Amino acid sequence: MFRLLRYTPLLALFLLAGCGPDASIEDQVKGRIASMELAGENGERANFMAHVATGFGAQQGQMTRDDFRRFMFLQMNQRRRIQAQLFPITVTVQSANLAEARFKALVTGGGAGWFPAEGQLFNITTQWSFEDGEWMLWQADWEPIGP
């Protein structure tokens, strides 16, 4: 309950910013990222993958959309609780249909206890394409920071 309350104002801001037709591309992409973060933390695999484009690729072309779906399924099944803290998200608009978002993510996971059993900080670079009126995750690359 407290976790939900802590994220409610931020989530509402992202969702409202990303929904309106007058929202900037930056706000729309950040809204998509926030939706994916929430779906991932709630273990909602289908909602998470709904934002991933059909032609998605990751890790410099080493991973397809299906590979990524299996990877996320494995991560969500291995850890009872997954949380991510994203900061700062920088969106660069490359054209009307293409944008890049870069950020760091602290991802933690573990059992049902109060404290996470494990965690890792990542540098993440994503490419977003505007398809059928929605921003979709087209490409993602991530690398761990530190040990």
Image: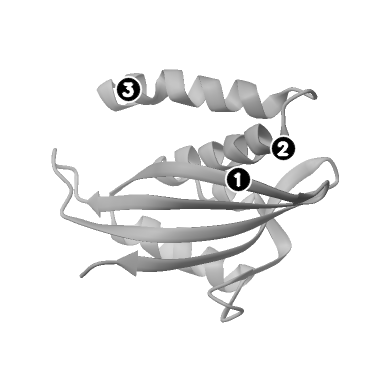
The residue under the point 26% across, 52% down is 109
Q: Is mark 3 on a helix, strand or loop?
A: helix
User: Does the CB distance between marks 2 and 1 fall below 8 Å?
Assistant: yes
Q: Quadrant of residue 142?
A: bottom left
N-term-proximal mark, 1 vs 3: 3
N-term-proximal mark, 2 vs 1: 2
Q: Can residue 36 be seen at all in this image of the molecule? A: no
- Name the quarter where the C terminus is drawn: bottom left
Looking at the picture, which amino acid does disc 2 mark? Ile
Q: What element carries label 2?
A: helix
The residue under the point 54% across, 67% down is 68
Q: Can residue 22 be seen at all in this image of the molecule? A: yes
- Residue 98's x, y, as percent? 76, 53
- Residue 2's x, y, as percent? 26, 21
Q: Mark 3 points at which residue?
A: 6
Q: How crowded is mark 1: few (under 14 residues within 10 Å), some or many (20 or more)?
A: many
The residue under the point 53% across, 74% down is 59
Q: Name the residue under label 1.
A: 91
Q: What element carries label 1?
A: strand
Compared with 121, 31 (above or below) is above
Compared with 29, 108 (above or below) is below
The residue under the point 19% across, 49% down is 111
Relative to 99, 66 lies left or right: left
Looking at the picture, which amino acid does disc 1 mark? Val
Compared with 2, 84 (above or below) is below
Q: Distance between the residues labelled 2 and 3?
A: 26 Å
Q: How far apart are marks 1 and 3 (CA)?
A: 24 Å
Q: How far apart are marks 2 and 1 (CA)?
A: 8 Å
Q: Mark 2 points at which residue?
A: 25
Relative to 100, 120 lies left or right: left
